[in-house]
Amino acid sequence: SVCEDLAHQLMLNGWSVLTTSTNPHRLPRLVDMLNTVWHKRHQYELAQIDVYSGLAFFWAEAVAWALRRAKKPYILTLHGGNLPKFSRRWPYRFKLLLQSATAITTPSRYLIEQINLSGSKFWYLPNPLKLSNYTFCERYSTQPKLIWLRAFHDIYN
């Protein structure tokens, strides 16, 4: 995933990076994240939380709450095309989460426009793709098929 790649690149550049929960199951992953936030709070200075819509949003809220209790600053990274609709359904909770963050990033111009993100703590950071990992193959005739990818991760295969 992009987050795993970012963590790896930061480590290669000498940063100390602590990651949490590769568990594909929701509840154990949440418990692992909350445990890491609290029990390892002396091992990190700043946290980053991926924010999606649906149940994942409430997980992000819970992690942000734990980080505030641990007195740790955090950066939110907004993802997912359904987040604008979700933010309109839960405007108070959404606004409260964004206001509590030290900074907010998104790899999506769509989210910036739809959620009307502006201000000094919002940053557009596109997902980095290593194009050398993808070989170009020119096609002369195609048979289009639709595929929707949420992420390049084993749990989605």
Image (cartoon, grey):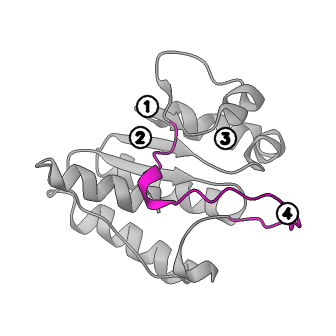
Please report whichever mark, 3 or 1, sits nearer to the chain's N-terminal start. 3
Q: Which residues are magenta?
A: 126-149
Q: Residues within 10 Å of mark 2 (few under 14, many from 20)?
A: many
Q: Is residue 130 left or right of residue 17?
A: right
State the separation of the CA atoms marked 4 and 3.
42 Å
Q: Mark 4 or mark 2, which is nearer to you?
A: 4
- Left or right, 103 with respect to 122, comes to left
Secondary structure of residue under mark 3: helix
Indicate which disc residue 94 carries.
3
Amino acid bearing label 3: Phe
- Of tags 4 and 3, the one toward the viewer is 4
The reply to whether callout 1 and callout 4 are in contact (CB within 8 Å) is: no
Q: Main secondary structure of the magenta part?
A: loop
Residue at which label 4 appears: 142
Identify which residue is drawn at 52% across, 38% down. 126
Q: Amino acid at mark 1?
A: Ala
N-terminal label among 1 and 2: 2
- In the image, residue 128 lies in the stretch drawn in magenta: yes
Location of mark 1 (residue): 103
Q: What is the secondary structure assignment of the residue under circle 1? A: strand
Which disc number belongs to residue 11?
none
> Which mark sits nearer the N-terminus, 2 or 3?
2
Q: Work out whether residue 111 or residue 149 is closer to the camera in this orientation and state it.
A: 149
Q: Tag 2 or tag 4, which sits nearer the N-term?
A: 2
Q: CA distance from mark 1 to mark 2?
A: 5 Å
Q: Give yes or no for contact between labels 1 and 2 (Cβ–Cβ under 8 Å).
A: yes
Crowd rating for badge 1 (residues with CA inside 10 Å; few <14, some 14–19, many 20+): some
Assess whether mark 1 and mark 3 are in contact (beta carbons under 8 angstroms).
Answer: no
| CA distance for labels 3 and 1 | 14 Å
Left or right: 29, with 82 as reference point: left
Which label lies toward us, 2 or 3? Answer: 2
User: Could you say whether the residue bearing mark 2 is in a helix, strand or loop?
Assistant: strand
